[in-house]
Amino acid sequence: MRDRYSRLYVHLIWATWDRLPLIDEEIRAPVYRAIAEQARRAGCEAMAVGGIADHVHVLVQMSTAVSVGDVVKSMKGGSSHLAPRVLRPGAFFKWQGSYGAFSISRTHVPAVSAYIHNQERHHAENRLSRALERVGSR
């Protein structure tokens, strides 16, 4: 096989600084778009982006040319640059340094995507994956 072929899916989670509720309705969509754009620039595809005011989940189809750490650094950096400089000039916005990364199989992509897209409802109804929601809160 001469051409690279891969189907690598990673569910990423990271939190805002001290789990502060920094991602409100006003900036949520532009921050999520910035995260997806940074993934694309890294050669990856953000298949789902969602979360609530204090953390974000991203399902990424990874490229074989970039590490998980590098794509996370790019997504976090691009979005944290956008918020205080463009969306709310001078306002505080910062991600925690840590993140969680969980590889998933192709068959689990639809379920994980749905979990990510429905974060607000899952939190409101307390139907959460405790293992995933604890990331960044330790």
Image: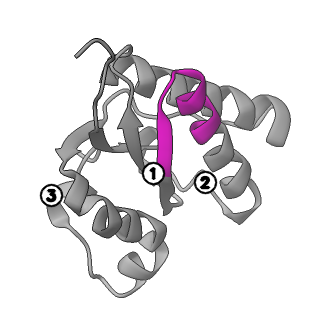
* Contact, mark 2 vs mark 3 (Cβ under 8 Å): no
Horizontal side of 39 relative to 129 (left or right) equals right
Circles 1 and 2, Cβ within 8 Å, touching? The answer is yes
In the picture of the structure, the residue carrying the numbered disc 1 is: 56
In this view, the residue farthest toward the front is: 1
In-image side of 124 versus 88 (left or right): left
Q: CA distance from mark 3 to mark 1?
A: 14 Å
Q: Is residue 135 above or below residue 115?
A: above
According to the image, label 2 marks what residue?
23
Q: Position of residue 14 (x, y in %)?
A: 38, 42
The residue that label 3 is drawn on is 131
At x 70% / y 65%, what residue is drawn? 25
Left or right of 89? Residue 83 is left
Q: Position of residue 77 (x, y in %)?
A: 56, 23
- Say what amino acid the circle numbered 1 marks: Val
User: How many C-alpha atoms fall within 10 Å of the one at disc 2: few (<14), some, or many (≥20)?
Assistant: many
Q: Is residue 48 visible?
A: yes
Tell me the distance, in whole angstroms, between the alpha carbons under discs 1 and 2: 9 Å
Kindly identify the residue that appears in the image at 58 percent across and 38 percent down. Answer: 35
Q: Position of residue 131 (x, y in %)?
A: 15, 58
Identify the residue at horizontal 22%, vertical 17% (top origin).
Answer: 1
Q: Is residue 104 above or below residue 126?
A: above
| Residues shaded magenta | 35-47
Judging from the image, what secondary structure is the residue with disc 2 in? loop
